[in-house]
Structure formats: C-alpha cells, structure tokens
Amino acid sequence: MKSLFVFACRWFCAGLLCTGLACAQDVTLTARVELLKGGKPVKAPEAENVVVWLVPEGGGVSPVFHQNHVPAAQLPRLVQYNKTFEPHVLVVPVGAVVAFPNRDPFFHNVFSLFEGKRFDLGLYEAGTTRDVHFDKPGISYIFCNIHPEMSAVVIALDTPYYGISDARGQVVIANVPSGKYTLRVWYEATPPEILKAMTREVTVSEASSTLGVLRLKEANLSTAHKNLYGRDYDSPAPDSPAYERH
C-alpha cells in the first residue's frame, strides 16, 4: 500500500506542471511487462518488480518532502525480518527518509556502497530502527554485512509519475498531466545496457492511455557481492550476538 506522503507528493508535483488557471485532464497510463528468457516469454506470475517512470520534458520534478511533517509511522520502510528485506524493491521520491526497522531477534548491519545513496548503518539490535535520507536520484542496492543472502533495492526518483509491475506484469501510472516525457525502465534481472536502450520519448495526452508492451530480456546476472569492506563474507562466529543462533 502506498503511504500518504506518496499521494501528497504526486498531487503537489502534478500541480507544478500546470500553468494558468486550469490544468489539462490528467491521464492514467497502463503498460504490460513481458519478460523474455532465451527468446521465450516467461510466465506472467514472475513479472513483478519492474519499475517504469516518466521524466517530464526539461528534467525531473523534484518532490518537496518535509521530514518534519511525516510521522515516523508513515515513513516508507524496508523491514528486516526472517533475514530478508520487505519489500524487495522500494520506490521513493528524492528527499524521502526511509526507515530500516530490525524485526529479527538478532543484529543486522545494513549498508549500500553502490550507485545512489552510500551508507553504513552499523550493528543494531532487534526492535530498533535506523533511518536513511535519500537526498538524490539513483538506484541503491542494499545489503546486510552479516547475512549475505539479504538484498533489496531502493530507487529514489525526481518524478512522481511511476508504476511498479505486479505479478501479472501489469503497470499503472496514475494522474499524469498531458505533455512530453522520457520513459525509463528498471528491472533487476535485465542488464543495464538493455534497460538504457529502452529509454524513449513519449507524448501523453487525454487520448492516450497505454504505454504498450515492454519486453525485457532476463539474464542470469550474478547476485554475489562482497561485504561492507570489499571482502568475502566470514563464517558466523557461534558465540557472537551479531549472528543468528540456531
């Protein structure tokens, strides 16, 4: 469920694109994702977490996100539970603060050293939360320095016009004002060069309602990664409180 601040942000940003006393009717756009592996379509129930967004002509619309006006309970969050992050893919407006609550009965150490926001939250125990301010656009790949199987992605966008595909590959982008945009696509299992080639210009009008079929090639991309210090993960120390005890 999208939190209230996302809806408020979209409303505010849409207003910035209107001129004069009236604004053209906003449009709800749809798209369908089709995943291809080895040249063959992948079953639709596996087509989730593809992010599609529209950047207005002339550049992004930077959302105005006031941390002081958002209660902690309404912050977007990436929950750590059962040694996973939930959700796996989170989209937020630039300027958002994301909460990282630890709901496991042991320590975690969340970090990101890649494109987007670089941070290290350090060790923190069960029942506590750390926050991260995503102050610039980008894609942040999130890991835990203790549990190598944990991963997530936070995408900070400077546009409120985006959608995330569901398990059937359906994408909905609501309340898009008429105008010219650059369409961009991201999917974790598609190589960056293919995603870049999918970037294109689109024109949104009251007569348009679909972005068509987006065909993405899946690849067996390596999910292996180093720890916070650029080394392979160590085996858990059996007497360390930072690790889950079996």
Image: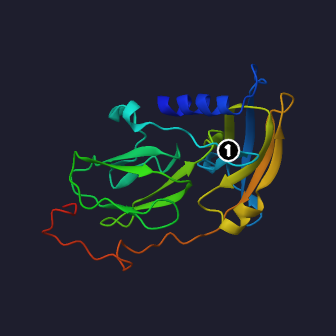
User: Is there any visible trace of residue 161 in the rendered image?
Assistant: yes
| Image quadrant occupied by the C terminus | bottom left
Horizontal placement of 13 versus 125: left or right?
A: right
Return the residue nearer the eye: 52 or 137. Answer: 137
SS for tag 1?
loop
Kind of residue indicated by mark 1? Gly
Within-10-Å neighbours for mark 1: few <14, some 14–19, many 20+: many
Q: Residue at x 83, y 27 (%)?
A: 206
The outermost residue toward the right is 207
Residue 128: % across, % down: 23, 46
Q: Is residue 234 left or right of residue 20?
A: left
What residue is shown at x 45% (from left), y 73% (from top)? 225
Q: Residue furthest top?
A: 21
The location of residue 54, given as percent across then percent down, is 71, 45
Vertical placement of residue 81 versus 161, above or below: below
Is the residue 109 above or below the residue 126 in the image?
below
Viewer-closest of 201 and 52 = 201
User: Circle 1 sits on which residue?
Assistant: 169
